[in-house]
Image (tube, grey):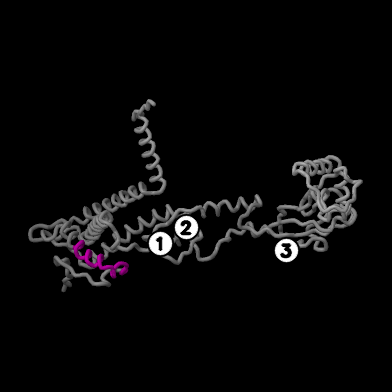
């Protein structure tokens, strides 16, 4: 005995839990529209002139899918527009229905890598190391722990890259100015330089124009640069060679800044549980009651296309039904084809609309609007004022 399966009876009454996932069942607007939209789709499919071999839960499932598809398309374009602004942000809050402000965080993060190499910031730590210099010893091995000290890592086992070596000539000011005026050799040399050497050195201060100080400093620097060995160094593999050759007791330590290569090569420099790619940007299901009339109309049309496709599969189970002295041919294939074509057309239509609303498209439209306005203003005759 064949089982009599009930089909659409002409009306329905929605209750929370009637949809497969229950994503919007608690939304009052969704509850009210479920029955209305189901009745509309049934009538668009030919009811009551023909039976609709679907139940109310089939309509509800199509309605839920239509809303979810609309939200997925909108969220996809929001993610595309906001991706650069959301990198590294927390994943715990729902961004659906919220304004995401543009910022330079993503661009600056991309520039951090250049800042590391330029020594102007970045996301890799600069450590400090030192070399204990010895008299008449010019070449030092950076892997030698007896003479090299690292702030982080161990010489000989840690792969580093030296970024800056603090090996420079003493600044000219230390040869020119002695804060203990009249008590040191530097002060006496300064007095002699001004032609006051024959006077008593027991003075508190001397007032000279600033340009005189600058000229004297420049003279000292030129003298050291031309007449003396330049302060420099050469690096080759793990060896560093200093110029001039250290002598006396003036050289004690030379400091340098370095990075650890493994830290620079580490791609995981951000915090955990933050936005990293398309998959974990926290855009969740949209709120149905907040969808405007344009969106709800798209949802109804998409639901109708889904219902056509579903009804086509149901009717396609049998290509025809026998009746006395004849048979009835069912339109399952036509419904499937029409439903799929309408779904594809609606998705394309929505994508085109969203494309026109992207940040880039809006900026281009504003630019065109400004250019057109400027052209119109150029055609307006200017007034001539006669005084």
**Residue at image location 82% in from the left, 45% down from the top:** 230
- For the N terminus, which image quadrant? bottom left
Residue ID for mark 3:
151
Instruction: Give the residues drawn in magenta, as a range.
Output: 21-38
Q: Is residue 204 above or below residue 382?
A: below
**Residue at image location 77% in from the left, 54% down from the top:** 238
**Residue at image location 16% in from the left, 71% down from the top:** 4
Residue ID for mark 2:
86
* Residue 97: image location, x then y, percent: 36, 60
* Residue 155: image location, x then y, percent: 76, 62
Q: Earlier in the sequence, mark 1 or mark 3?
A: 1
The front one of 119 and 318 is: 119
- For the C terminus, which image quadrant? top left
Rounded to the nearest angstrom, the CA distance separating label 1 from label 3 is: 43 Å
Residue 292's label in the rendered image is: none
- Magenta-highlighted stretch: main secondary structure? helix
Residue 305 in view here: no
SS class of the residue under badge 3?
loop
* Residue 320: image location, x then y, percent: 17, 58
Residue 95's label in the rendered image is: 1
Mark 3 burial class by Cα count in 10 Å: few <14, some 14-19, many 20+:
few
């Amino acid at each position: 005995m064949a089982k009599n399966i009930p089909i659409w009876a002409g009306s329905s009454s929605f209750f929370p839990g009637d949809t497969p996932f229950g994503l919007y069942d608690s939304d009052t607007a969704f509850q009210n529209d479920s029955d209305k939209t189901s009745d509309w789709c049934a009538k668009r499919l030919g009811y009551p002139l023909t039976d609709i071999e679907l139940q109310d839960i089939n309509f509800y499932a199509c309605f839920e899918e239509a809303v979810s598809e609309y939200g997925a398309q909108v969220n996809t374009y929001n993610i595309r527009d906001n991706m650069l602004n959301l990198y590294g942000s927390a994943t715990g809050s729902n961004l659906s229905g919220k304004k995401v402000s543009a910022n330079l965080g993503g661009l600056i993060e991309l520039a951090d890598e250049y800042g590391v190499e330029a020594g102007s910031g970045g996301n890799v730590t600069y450590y400090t190391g030192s070399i204990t210099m010895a008299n008449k010893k010019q070449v030092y091995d950076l892997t030698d722990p007896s003479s090299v000290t690292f702030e982080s890592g161990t010489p000989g086992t840690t792969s580093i890259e030296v970024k800056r070596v603090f090996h420079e000539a003493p600044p000219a000011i230390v040869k020119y100015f002695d804060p203990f005026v009249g008590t040191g050799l530097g002060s006496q040399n300064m007095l002699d330089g001004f032609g006051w050497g024959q006077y008593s050195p027991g003075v508190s201060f001397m007032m000279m124009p600033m340009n005189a100080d600058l000229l004297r400093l420049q003279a000292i620097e030129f003298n050291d640069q031309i007449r003396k060995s330049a302060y420099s160094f050469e690096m080759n593999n793990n060896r560093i060679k200093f110029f001039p050759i250290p002598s006396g007791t003036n050289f004690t330590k030379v400091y340098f800044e370095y990075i650890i290569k493994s830290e620079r090569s580490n791609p995981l420099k951000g915090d955990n549980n933050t936005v990293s790619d398309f998959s974990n940007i926290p855009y969740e299901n949209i709120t149905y009651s907040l969808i405007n009339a344009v969106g709800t109309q798209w949802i109804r049309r998409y639901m109708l296309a889904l219902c056509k496709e579903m009804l086509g599969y149901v009717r396609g189970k049998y290509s025809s039904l026998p009746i006395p002295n004849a048979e009835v041919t069912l339109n399952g294939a036509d419904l499937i084809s029409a439903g799929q074509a309408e779904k594809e057309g609606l998705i394309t239509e929505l994508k085109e609309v969203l494309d026109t609303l992207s940040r880039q498209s809006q900026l281009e439209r504003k630019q065109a609007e400004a250019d057109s306005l400027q052209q119109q203003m150029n055609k307006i005759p200017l007034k001539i004022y006669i005084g």
